[in-house]
Amino acid sequence: MLVVSRRILICFFLMAMGLALGSCSSAEEKRTKYFEKGKALFEEGDYGKAVLEFRSAIQVDPEFAKAYRYLGECEVRRRDMQKAFGYFSRAVELDPQLLEAQLSLGYIYFGANQTDKTREKLSVILKKDPEDSKALVLKSLVLIREEQAQEAEGILKGLLAKGE
């Protein structure tokens, strides 16, 4: 009787583990499905529907930094910079190496005349990729604002010479 009970317990344990492992891949599949659908809608310019898909991806995985980044991009295009700022901030909080979100925050800070914070974001990006053309354009804008036009011109000429 005791041997049968142990076997039953082992069977239940193995079934529970199988269900747990199966639900993990299922959750990741759902997250990916929502995210990919959101990206497709984003590319089509349907930002309202894209937001719904990215939010669904976040409901499945609340720490999915890329979905927060795309939510921020949707809100930029819908001209809600406050929401965009919140989403980009959450994205870089979850993944500081998500350079696209760092850059978007840099542009928001630049637009708000917060040059020091813009420079902080640029530092993160350019430390990882010193040739990032979008970050270099933002850096040149900061330099122009700080009346360092010659240095900005040098950066921009360098980008033009590379064909970027």
Image: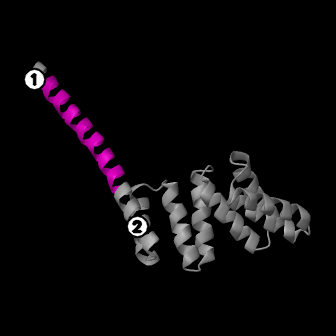
Q: In what quadrant of the picture does the N terminus appear?
A: top left
User: Dot 2 surroundings within 10 Å: few (below 14), some, or many (20 or more)?
Assistant: few
User: Dot 1 surroundings within 10 Å: few (below 14), some, or many (20 or more)?
Assistant: few
In the displayed structure, does residue 59 sit left or right of residue 96?
A: left
Read off the residue under disc 2. 40
x, y percentage for residue 4?
A: 9, 23
Residue found 61% across the figure and 60% down from its top: 101
Number of numbered discs present? 2
Given this view, does label 1 or label 2 mark the residue nearer the observer?
Answer: 2
The disc at residue 4 is 1
In the displayed structure, does residue 68 sit left or right of residue 81?
A: left
Q: Is residue 155 depicted above or below 96 in this figure?
A: below
Residue found 26% across the figure and 36% down from its top: 17
Residue found 73% across the figure and 51% down from its top: 126
x, y percentage for residue 80?
A: 59, 78
Q: CA distance from mark 1 to mark 2?
A: 53 Å
In the displayed structure, does residue 20 sit left or right of residue 59?
A: left
